[in-house]
Image: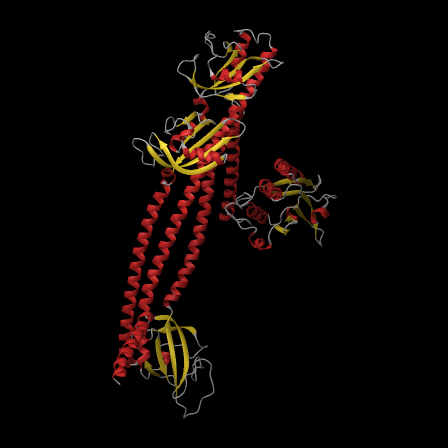
């Protein structure tokens, strides 16, 4: 017995603790707090994941930049080596065929070498060394040196090796141009029988070889090294930044080259100067810097390229973004915590208010006084029985004055019309206001019947119940003043939005006019430069001028399209009507798309006869519509397809001839789900950022508006994968003549 007695309180306390815990976990305030904490964790987890992801992306971008840097130097080196090899081969042929090729100090050979050197920007000098080791010819303006060059490695290597290929030596100091370091590229010179005649040497200036790299501002991004396969460094940019003189002293690079010809690794880079971009902190006194290293072995030539980019420079932007996102996460955490605390506190206050309201309801009249709407009960005769507090506030009259009064004292039309409708109520001071009035039948002693018919004389009449049946009616009155105001505000907002849209269109029209003036100047000056009016330009400059001209024309077309669209939307576009020959307009538009169609392999079929019709239209608008349809057809038709344009007269039952023109293509077609938005401005079937076909999405919208202004229609019939037919129809009033013979319409209709 004592054991049972001692266990009972323990079980009771455990049960009480479990109930308290369930009550705490089930409380709304606990759930709100837990939700706020969970939201804070989710937000910070997402920010942390984004920071880690952006770090990986920054490192990936750094690796790509390092590889691009190495490839840039590789391309420059390959171009230079290949060009030098060809130049030396051509020089050997010239020396063999020229009578003065073996004669020392020939003026003709000197002029030939000088012209060859001047045509090659990276060359500092060209030297022809005889078999005795003395210079036979060179391209320098100084006299030929009389000292032997047989101690130069480029001479001994070419002499001792039978290989006729290009030999690359370590950088040397030129004896002809004192103080100038050059990279010797040499080739063995032999006669027809293979006998050694000497060495052809091209001395490459490293500073010119690195001109392309210096234009890319390598010192703000990283560094590059060009070395021979034996590790001899030929070129380093920026100068003396990497703390190695031979690649053999760089174990990480040696390990990478031992396994692959191309690799990107991450390792410490020995530095002798501050590294990284402006955003990176310098490395005082040198040391090692964590870097991304791209190593490449140049195929076909004995070169090795090493490009480095400090990780600190790669992650500089990421570190700034991380600081910003950390600050954002901190602010969001504080904001969410404060908002959660505020919501919990407001909920606690609400619970206290509800408790007080419940106590007050029990003390006063219960549920009626807790309702926000006015609640009025009245008997079968329409006399008011109760009048809740909300009704007192709404009508401005105390309950005691309304008891026994007819319901018409509040709502004059309460006995007319159906239930649950908007009526006009009268306050005690005589002011009218809109209300929603709903009446339900409450049978005393029985369950209420919601939305029952009104009492006799209120709303739809019903058979009078028996005189002994107790019954009362509950009328709920809702003040609709605010809703009516909101409806009026919505209407006003709609009107304001329409005015704003019109103002926007007018603004775009005015701005388009302002933009066309500088654009026309840009296009005109580009055409003047291309005509070489101010002097001769080279091919690269011509290419840049062509790009400027084409970009200006493209931007001008976009501005013109926006201007036309703005005029159409604002109702400012006015037609300038005149007689237009259809075949001439079609021919002019076909000429404008001919080059683009030829470039895309699209065939243009013109089935418009020379005497189709003369139309009374705006010539520019009509041609723009045809040009838009042809341009779209060519753009969306793959190579090998065709675009066919046909035109003719429609004949109605009265013999009046309308006009039809159709552009049919065998292109990709239009998806059915896009047909509803086909003529909407700025809409395209492919709205992705990387969409395949360029354009603003204004062409068809402008075309349809132009045709609508002429009283015609523009329709589309398309099948995905088969093709599209765009058809223009103009009314008979637009046709100025009716020739007896028209174009073959059957093909266009098909």
**Residue 511 rendering spot, x and y as whole percentages:** 45, 41
Horizontal placement of 528 versus 333: left or right?
right
Which sits in the foreground, 93 or 231?
231
Relative to residue 34, is residue 460 depicted above or below?
below
**Residue 727 rendering spot, x and y as whole percentages:** 64, 48
Number of numbered discs visible in the structure rendering: 0
**Residue 498 rendering spot, x and y as whole percentages:** 45, 53
Residue at screen point 46% across, 32% down: 70
Which sits in the foreground, 692 or 438?
692
Horizontal placement of 495 versus 616: left or right?
left
Residue at screen point 37% across, 57% down: 42
Which sits in the foreground, 682 or 157?
157
Whether residue 185 appears in this view of the structure is: yes
Whether residue 397 appears in this view of the structure is: no
Spot the residue most to the bottom.
Answer: 468
Horizontal placement of 555 versus 734: left or right?
left
Specify the color scheme. Answer: secondary structure
**Residue 275 rendering spot, x and y as whole percentages:** 35, 33
**On the image, which quarter does residue 378 sit in?**
bottom left
């Amino acid at each position: 017995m004592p054991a049972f007695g001692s266990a009972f309180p323990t079980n009771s306390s455990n049960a009480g603790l479990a109930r308290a815990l369930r009550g705490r976990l089930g409380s709304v305030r606990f759930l709100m707090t837990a939700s706020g904490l969970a939201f804070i964790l989710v937000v910070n987890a997402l920010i942390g994941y984004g920071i880690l992801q952006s770090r990986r992306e920054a490192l990936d971008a750094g690796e790509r930049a390092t590889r691009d840097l190495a490839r840039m130097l590789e391309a420059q080196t390959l171009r230079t080596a290949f060009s030098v090899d060809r130049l030396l081969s051509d020089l050997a042929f010239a020396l063999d065929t020229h009578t003065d090729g073996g004669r020392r100090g020939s003026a003709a050979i000197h002029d030939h070498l000088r012209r060859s050197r001047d045509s090659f920007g990276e060359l500092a000098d060209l030297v022809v060394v005889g078999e005795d080791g003395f210079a036979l010819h060179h391209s320098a303006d100084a006299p030929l040196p009389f000292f032997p060059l047989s101690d130069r490695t480029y001479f001994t290597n070419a002499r001792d090796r039978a290989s006729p290929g290009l030999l690359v030596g370590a950088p040397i100091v030129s004896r002809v141009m004192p103080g100038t370091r050059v990279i010797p590229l040499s080739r063995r010179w032999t006669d027809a029988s293979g006998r050694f005649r000497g060495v052809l040497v091209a001395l490459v200036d490293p500073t010119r070889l690195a001109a392309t790299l210096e234009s890319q501002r390598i010192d703000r991004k990283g560094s590059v090294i060009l070395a021979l396969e034996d590790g001899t460094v030929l070129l380093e940019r920026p100068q003396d930044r990497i703390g190695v003189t031979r690649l053999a002293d760089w174990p990480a690079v040696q390990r990478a080259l031992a396994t692959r010809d191309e690799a990107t690794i991450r390792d410490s880079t020995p530095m002798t100067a501050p590294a990284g971009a402006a955003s990176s902190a310098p490395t005082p006194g040198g040391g090692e810097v964590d870097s991304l290293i791209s190593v490449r072995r140049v195929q076909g030539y004995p070169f090795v390229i090493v490009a480095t980019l400090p990780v600190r420079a790669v992650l500089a932007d990421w570190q700034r973004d991380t600081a910003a996102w950390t600050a954002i996460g901190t602010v969001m955490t504080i904001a969410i915590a404060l908002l959660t605390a505020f919501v919990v506190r407001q909920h606690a206050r609400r619970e206290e208010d509800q408790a007080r309201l419940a106590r007050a309801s029990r003390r006063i009249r219960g549920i009626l006084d807790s309702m926000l709407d006015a609640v009025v009960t009245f008997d079968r005769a329409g006399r008011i029985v109760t009048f809740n507090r909300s009704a007192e506030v709404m009508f401005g009259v105390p309950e005691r004055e309304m008891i026994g009064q007819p319901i018409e004292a509040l709502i004059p039309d309460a006995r007319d019309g159906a239930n649950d409708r908007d009526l006009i109520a009268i306050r005690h001071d005589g002011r009218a206001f809109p209300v929603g009035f709903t009446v339900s039948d409450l049978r005393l002693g029985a369950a209420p019947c919601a939305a029952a018919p009104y009492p006799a004389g209120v709303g739809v009449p019903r058979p009078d119940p028996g005189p002994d049946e107790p019954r009362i009616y509950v009328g709920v009155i809702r003040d609709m003043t605010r809703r009516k105001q909101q409806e009026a505000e919505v209407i006003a907002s709609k009107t304001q939005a329409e005015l704003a849209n019109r103002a926007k269109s007018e603004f775009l029209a005015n701005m388009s006019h302002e933009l066309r003036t500088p654009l026309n100047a840009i296009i005109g000056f580009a055409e003047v430069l291309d005509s070489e009016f101010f002097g001769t330009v080279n091919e690269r400059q011509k290419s840049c001028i062509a790009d400027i001209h084409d970009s200006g024309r493209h931007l001008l077309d976009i501005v013109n399209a926006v201007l036309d669209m703005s005029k159409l939307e604002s109702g400012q576009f006015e037609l300038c009507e005149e007689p237009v020959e259809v075949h001439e307009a079609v021919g002019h538009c076909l000429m404008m798309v001919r080059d683009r169609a030829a470039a895309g392999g699209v065939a243009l079929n013109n089935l418009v006869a020379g005497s189709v019709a003369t139309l009374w239209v705006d010539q520019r608008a009509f041609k723009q519509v045809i040009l838009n349809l042809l341009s779209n057809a060519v753009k969306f038709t793959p190579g090998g397809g065709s675009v066919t344009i046909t035109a003719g007269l429609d004949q109605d039952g009265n013999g009046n001839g309308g006009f039809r023109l159709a552009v049919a293509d065998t292109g990709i077609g239009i998806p059915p789900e896009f047909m509803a938005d086909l003529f909407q401005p700025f809409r395209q079937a492919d709205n992705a950022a990387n969409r395949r076909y360029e354009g603003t999405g204004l062409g068809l919208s402008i075309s349809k508006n132009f045709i609508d202004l002429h009283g015609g229609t523009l329709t589309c019939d398309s099948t995905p994968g088969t093709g599209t037919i765009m058809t223009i129809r103009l009314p008979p009033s637009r046709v100025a003549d009716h020739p007896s013979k028209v174009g073959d319409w059957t093909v266009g209709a098909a």
